[in-house]
Image (spheres, grey):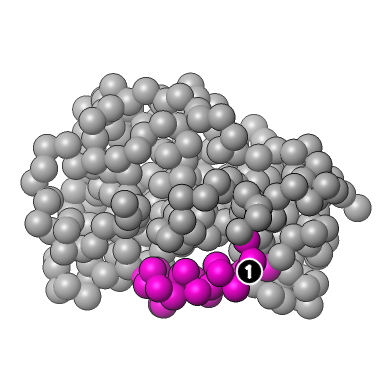
């Protein structure tokens, strides 16, 4: 079963009472001020604020996975219920939306999808955009974290040493190979020992995820049959793009290293 929904599906099901549309964009087009006149969002969407509301802001690392309590509280504020059908998009096609999708999956909500093509796809249909976010009354969403969905620094250290799982890094080849500086100030370059590189851009055609045939070929080339997979990146966001792509073509076990290179590169000299 696909974890993607098309814009056509969204348009045909826009009036479903259980439907929740979340905008997981993380730049100026998804501003904190929902009353700004220049915001462009899909009508009926609510803002999924990854940085401020759906992360552990007390952590020294960005986008850190939140507690069950915090995620449940923030999800309920968005009117999300146990029977909600959640469709998540972002304004870069497929970029930050898989992170939000993965979080809902990790907290036990299965009926959640990424809008393939995101805001780009919606705009290509010629549909009118809204200038403000929707607000809903509180929902009854219940968060229960699944075991093994989120990998810690200590777990990755063990995996790297004994090669029990395959660590796949979603950063660019230049960052993975230390050919350019990391964008985060003060963070050293490098990669996790024994990890391999698959830039997240390679599983996409512009704003859209590549076809299942293309994705199957990409993952087959990595010789992954003997290993469970752990996806990592810079700060736990683009790793989720790889996991989304992988789940389109395989039911094989895969997880996310939440701290990713920001944590590893800070803690390991």
Name the one closer to the observer, 24 or 214. 214
Residue 234 in the image: x percent, y percent?
A: 66, 58
Inspect this view and state whether residue 110 appears: yes
Residue bounds of the magenta highlight: 197-224
The question of residue 1 being in magenta is answered with no
Residue located 13% across and 58% down the image: 11
Asked if residue 207 lies in the magenta stretch, the reply is: yes
Q: Which residue is mark 1?
A: 222
At x 22%, y 57%, the residue is 42
Residue at figure coordinates x 64%, y 32% from the top left: 58
Taking depth in this image into account, of 167 and 46 the one nearest to the observer is 167
What x and y, as percent, mark residue 104?
Answer: 41, 38
Q: Is residue 249 above or below residue 146?
A: below
Q: On the picture, is 232 further left or further right than 129?
A: right
Residue at the extreme right of the image, as rendered: 269
Residue toward you, 194 or 46 = 194
Q: In this orientation, does residue 201 appear?
A: no
Where 224 sits versus 21, above or below?
Answer: below
Q: Residues within 10 Å of mark 1 (few under 14, many from 20)?
A: few
Local SS, label 1: loop
The image shows residue 138 at horizontal and vertical percentages of 26, 25
Q: Left or right: where does residue 135 sit relative to residue 181?
A: left
Image quadrant where residue 130 sits = bottom left
Residue 157 screen position, x and y as percent: 81, 44
């Amino acid at each position: 079963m696909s974890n993607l929904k098309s814009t056509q599906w969204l348009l045909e099901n826009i009036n479903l009472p259980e439907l929740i549309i979340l905008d997981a964009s993380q730049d100026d087009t998804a501003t904190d001020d929902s009353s700004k006149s220049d915001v462009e969002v899909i009508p009926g969407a609510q803002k999924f604020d990854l940085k401020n509301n759906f992360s552990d802001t007390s952590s020294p690392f960005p986008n850190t996975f939140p507690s069950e309590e915090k995620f449940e509280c923030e999800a309920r504020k968005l009117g999300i219920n146990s029977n909600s059908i959640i469709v998540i998009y972002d304004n870069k096609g497929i970029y930050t939306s898989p992170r939000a999708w993965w979080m809902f999956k990790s907290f036990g909500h299965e009926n959640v999808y990424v809008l393939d093509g995101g805001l780009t796809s919606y705009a290509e249909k010629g549909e009118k955009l809204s200038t403000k976010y929707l607000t809903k009354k509180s929902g009854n969403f219940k968060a229960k974290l699944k075991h093994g969905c989120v990998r810690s620094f200590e777990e990755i250290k063990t995996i790297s040493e004994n090669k029990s799982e395959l660590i796949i890094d979603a950063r660019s080849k230049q960052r993975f190979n230390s050919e350019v500086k990391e964008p985060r100030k003060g963070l050293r370059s490098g990669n996790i020992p024994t990890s391999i590189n698959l830039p997240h851009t390679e599983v996409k055609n512009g704003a859209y995820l590549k076809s299942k045939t293309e994705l199957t070929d990409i993952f087959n080339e990595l010789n992954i049959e003997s290993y469970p997979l752990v996806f990592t990146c810079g700060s736990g966001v683009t790793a989720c793009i790889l996991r989304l792509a992988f789940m389109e073509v395989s039911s094989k076990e895969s997880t996310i290293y939440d701290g990713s290179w920001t944590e590893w590169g800070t803690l390991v000299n």
